[in-house]
Image (cartoon, rainbow, N blue to C red):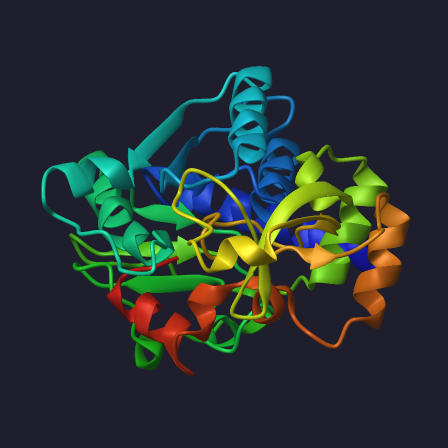
Amino acid sequence: SHLDALESEAVHIFREVAGEFERPVILFSGGKDSIVMLHLALKAFAPAPVPFSLLHVDTGHNFPEVLAHRDATVERHNLRLHVAHVQDFIDDGTLRERPDGTRNPLQTVPLLDAIDKNRFDAVFGGGRRDEEKARAKERVFSLRDEFGGWDPRRQRPELWQLYNGRHSPGEHVRVFPLSNWTELDVWQYIGHEKIELPAIYYAHQREVFSRNGMWLSAGDWGGPTDTEKTTLQTRTVRYRTVGDMSCTGAVDSDADTNDAIITEIAASRLTERGATRADDKMSEAAMEDRKREGYF
């Protein structure tokens, strides 16, 4: 099936990186794409353990359910997890809180610092081309310069699944095994492989409030404001994508099973990030600007 072909391609990419690079790492947040990516890595090297450690940039505003799932997964598979905390960089004055309270754009500096300190030369990310137009420009092996920046003009051809991992000292390569997957593919694969996800991906009752046309989750991160408290209500929602609580919106949904979610996604006319991520709506080129600075 097409899922077999996508799985085979991803497994090939993991093994190719293991052969070409010295210190790869997998970005792992506990979100669905990183969970699928780790599942593929486990398959790629079974029965041996995954030869890479994991890295998470913790904003301090993450969903507790997702962090709990992250930690349980790491423990279950006996993996090593590096955590870079945005709060540490705020405390030492390297970063400053944004007026809108969101910390998602603040992840770049902690990420690049962790890559540099640990000398990671290949960084696996769960980005997919169908998510956002800047990510559609990305190759599977994406060269980053010595400052972690991305230049679309330096993208390399990848004919016949031949990947070029050459890089100069100080540079590294971002690797995207799920590049050719769609949101629908991810959910079909989750169902086929019976992969466990955090409960917030399925319909549940949650206290939310309205901000800029999205339902945000109330919490200690700073929402809702006094004026937004009038919109506070309990709704049946789920999350299509998961990031910082301050910029990830929930969608009204009764889909509480994989099959129901697949049906819902098949009928949707909006991408998951386009529908629920405020950080992508700051400008037309918000994602591309952040990628040029070193973002995921």
Residue in front for this viewpoint, 97 or 9: 97
Res. 44 image quadrant: top right
x and y, in percent, of residue 250 in the image: 64, 55
Count of residue discs: 0
- Which residue is found at the position 73% from the left and 32% from the top? 196
x and y, in percent, of residue 81 in the image: 40, 26
Please indicate, yes or no, whether residue 4 appears anywhere in the rendered image: no
Please indicate, yes or no, whether residue 55 appears anywhere in the rendered image: yes
Res. 230 image quadrant: bottom right
- Which residue is found at the position 43% from the left and 65% from the top? 279
Residue in front for this viewpoint, 293 or 166: 293
x and y, in percent, of residue 97 in the image: 23, 52
x and y, in percent, of residue 268 in the image: 78, 71
The quarter of the image holding the N terminus is bottom right
- Placement of 50 over or under 245, stated as above or below: above
Left or right of 100: which side holds 213?
Answer: right
Left or right of 134: which side holds 196?
Answer: right
The quarter of the image holding the C terminus is bottom left
- Which residue is found at the position 9% from the left and 44% from the top? 93
Res. 181 image quadrant: bottom right
- Which residue is found at the position 34% from the left and 56% from the top? 173
Residue in front for this viewpoint, 24 or 199: 199
